Amino acid sequence: MTDQLVAEPRRRPRPRLSLRPLRTRGFRLLLLGQAASEFGNAFQAVSLPLLVYAFGGGTERLSLVVSASPSAA
């Protein structure tokens, strides 16, 4: 039996999730504004085609609105 030291493999430190930016009021307002904007974009992507179809736009106009909307890309 030999007493050899076995080197343990080096572990990369995992990046820690920091909540420190949330302490700043400006960052919280920016984050809230961006979240509201994304919600509005998603809501618009669903509601505009439904609105066109509900007002009797027909399938031709509906396809035009869906293809021209920025969320179609």
Image (cartoon, rainbow, N blue to C red):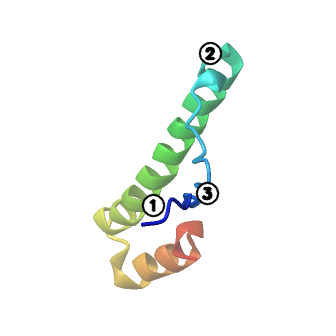
Please identify the quarter of the rendering in which residue 31 is found.
top right
Vertical comparison of 42 with 28: above or below: below
* Amino acid found under the numbered disc labelled 1: Ala
Placement of the C terminus among the 4 image quadrants = bottom right
* Amino acid found under the numbered disc labelled 2: Arg
Which of 71/29 is in front? 29
Q: Describe the element under mark 1 as helix, strand or loop.
A: helix
Q: Which mark is residue 45?
A: 1
Vertical comparison of 6 with 19: above or below: below
Q: Describe the element under mark 3 as helix, strand or loop.
A: loop
Horizontal arrangement in the rendering, residue 55 relative to residue 61 (left or right) = left
Q: Earlier in the sequence, mark 1 or mark 3?
A: 3
Would you say the residues marked 1 and 3 are in contact, meaning their CB atoms lie under 8 Å apart?
Answer: no
Mark 3 Cα-neighbour bin, 10 Å: few <14, some 14–19, many ≥20? few
Residue 70, given in percent of the width and then of the height, sits at 60, 68
Q: Write down the residue under mark 3.
A: 10
* Amino acid found under the numbered disc labelled 3: Arg
Would you say the residues marked 2 and 3 are in contact, meaning their CB atoms lie under 8 Å apart?
Answer: no
The residue at the point 66 percent across, 29 percent down is: 30
Q: Residue furthest bottom?
A: 60
Residue 14, given in percent of the width and then of the height, sits at 57, 48
Q: Which mark is residue 23?
A: 2
Horizontal arrangement in the rendering, residue 55 relative to residue 39 (left or right) = left
